[in-house]
Image: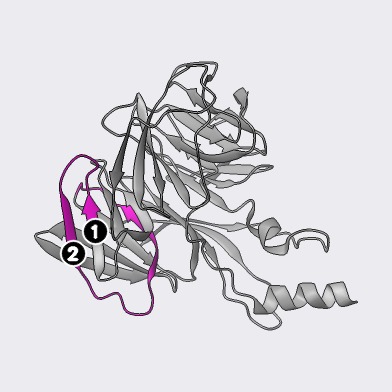
Amino acid sequence: MIVRTLSSLREQRLEIAAPTVPSTRLAFGTNRLLQASFDKATFRDSKQGHVITEASIGAVRAVAHGPDGGLFAVGASSGALLAPRAKAAKHFPRVAFLPGSELLPDLADPSHFFVYYSEDTQLYWYPFTSDAAPILTIEASFPMPGCLAPVAQLRDGAIVCRTATGFLRQAPRGSRTEFSFPLGDDLPVRLLPGMRLDEFFAVSRAGEVLHLRLAGGLVLLARFRLPAPAYAATANTEALAFVLVSRPKLGEARHWSLLVTNFEGQPRFESDLPSAAPSAEEDWLVALVEDKNLAISGFEPLVAVGGATRVSVWDYSQGRQLFSR
């Protein structure tokens, strides 16, 4: 009785907020999908879902895709890289990936990648190397003073983030520009790259989406409101994708959904998402959101939602599910 009451109170009263640093457990490459399992990286065919190869790298910390369509992951014991047409992944030494870190590709150089660490606002530059060293050596670091979460990588590789007075754009080896912008109390929880190199989207905790351009000053191009707060958000060059979660209401079950829109906020695809009630023995919040990771492809009109034990992929241009594993 007590367990049922506690579960009901959690479901109907506790709000699910987007994490400060997004969980990156899924990534699309060219005709491939990378899924972070508990202790391995699973590389799948992006349209049929069958496993191409797996790489045991310890507890998976994060995954990402490179500018050439390759896929890579960092884990507790090592990292793994799958080139666009390769059938087997290559391992590289372990990366120091602390809580609050984000994994980013080097869009100008597919032989390297970045790790952004929010605690000391530094962007670290690593090579993909097969050396037998126990830990991967940092080749360069780029300080980003004043940078606050959230953080996003623009189409030209520059980093954009929130600051105390607005936003900051900084290229790893180039210029740094700060932009004043009144944010109010509803702060952004996600920043997403736009189609243009100088544009991005800011998604607030309440579900408001701002379309912004870095042109001299910071220009607000458009704004729209999502039907519910976003737990996860991502973008490619033609669409925005969101995992939405309804606010808790007494007597009503929490509702999760997938929404893909154009850049004006008009829906292109929608689907309800399953949500099983965690058992009494599980960490309630961890169990509730473990399969709510989100990825959108930059190579095909595909979107994925899932986690370590389950992943589903849809073709949002045709409005149909391709597979669920």
Residue at screen point 42% across, 51% down: 234
The residue that label 1 is drawn on is 168
Q: Is residue 254 left or right of residue 305?
A: right
Between 215 and 33, which is closer to the camera in this rendering? Answer: 215
Front residue of 7/315: it is 7
Query: In this view of the protein, can residue 46 be seen by the observer?
Result: no
Local crowd at mark 1 within 10 Å, few (<14), some, or many (≥20)? many
Q: Is residue 88 above or below residue 319?
A: above
- Residue 123 to residue 264: above or below: above
Instruction: Give the percent coordinates (x, y) of residue 67.
Output: 33, 31
Region rendered in magenta: 169-197
- Percent x, y of residue 307: 62, 45
Kind of residue at badge 2:
Phe
Tag 2–tag 1 contact (CB < 8 Å): yes
Dividing the picture into quarters, in which one does residue 240 lie?
bottom left
Image quarter hosting the C terminus: top right
Find out whether residue 187 is within the magenta segment: yes
Task: Describe the colour scheme in one phrase.
Answer: one colour
Residue carrying label 2 = 179
**Badge 1 amino acid:** Leu
Q: Earlier in the sequence, mark 2 or mark 1?
A: 1
Within 10 Å of disc 2 (Cα), the crowding (few <14, some 14-19, many 20+) is some
Q: How many marks?
A: 2
Residue 208 appears left or right of 4: left
**Residue 178 at what x, y percent from top left?**
18, 61
Nearest the eye: 193 or 125: 125
Residue drawn at (48%, 30%) of the image? 72
Magenta stretch contains residue 304? no
323 or 24, which lies in front?
Answer: 24
Residue extending furthest toward the bottom: 250
